[in-house]
Image: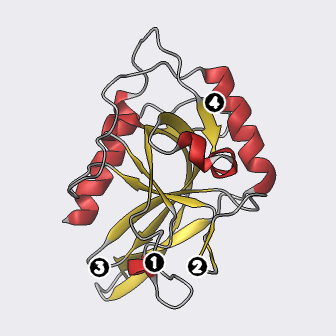
Amino acid sequence: MLKAALQFIILVGTVVGLRASDNPVKMLTVCEVFADVDHYAGNAIAIIGRMESSVSLIDHYEFLSQDHCKRRIVAHGHVWPGKIQVWTFSMEEGMPKPPTDKPTLDRAVVAAKLATGRKTTKLGAHHEPSRDLRGRPSTALVPNQWVVVYGRIVRSPHLDEDCGRSICSGFDAPLIVIAYPDQIHVIRDDGTLRHD
């Protein structure tokens, strides 16, 4: 049920697409956010990256990622991977809310940032639970997608934990982007936004 709900969230985001606005938004790759976390934490920005899913029978998490970032976040000896967890709602008390505006996403900038991300990052695929032809539990290889997410950047509540000795609640992402579902846009290979 959770998986179906999250697929609906992604679908809504791709169907709604861009809305007209006079407010162009700052657009960055994942690595550009990592290069100046202190500047971007707490701010609303658009981030382009590879959307990865971590899927099991009971959980589903989404991450924006980019490989080979020059700047990495290190805390308590733990080197965090170049990924940002995507939250489509913020239920934790004290966590910021997503931005409510609907900014213009400049297609030329989207295409240019996508080209930058592709220099270091292959799209790849992830495994998801499924069933074979006989109905037995199995896994399917599902392609990852390029996306742009407009939301608010926050530091992970687990960033202060000693993740070199423990598993940071399984999320292993130093940053979170909190966004409304209609602000998650799938990008085609040519850099245009998909509206299907």
Asked if disc 4 and disc 2 are in contact, CB closer than 8 Å, the reply is: no
| Residue pointed to by mark 3 | 57
Camera-side mark, 3 or 1: 1
Mark 1 surroundings: few (<14), some (14-19) or many (≥20) residues within 10 A: some
First-in-chain label (1 vs 4):
4
Q: Could you say whether the residue bearing mark 2 is in a helix, strand or loop?
A: loop
| Looking at the image, residue 155 lies above or below residue 14 | below
Query: What is the distance, in whole Å, between disc 2 and disc 1 at their CAs?
Result: 7 Å
Q: For this rendering, which residue is in front, 10 or 62? A: 62
Q: For this rendering, which residue is in front, 79 or 109? A: 79
First-in-chain label (3 vs 4):
3
| Residue pointed to by mark 2 | 76
First-in-chain label (2 vs 3):
3
Q: Could you say whether the residue bearing mark 4 is in a helix, strand or loop?
A: helix
| Residue pointed to by mark 1 | 161
Query: What is the distance, in whole Å, between disc 1 and disc 4 at their CAs?
Result: 35 Å
Name the residue type under label 4. Answer: Val
Quadrant in the picture for residue 188: top right
Quadrant holding the C terminus: top left
Residue visible at 48% across and 68% down in the picture: 159
Name the residue type under label 2. Answer: His
| Looking at the image, residue 140 lies above or below residue 36 | below
Camera-side mark, 1 or 4: 1
Camera-side mark, 2 or 3: 2
Name the residue type under label 1. Answer: Glu
| Residue pointed to by mark 4 | 110
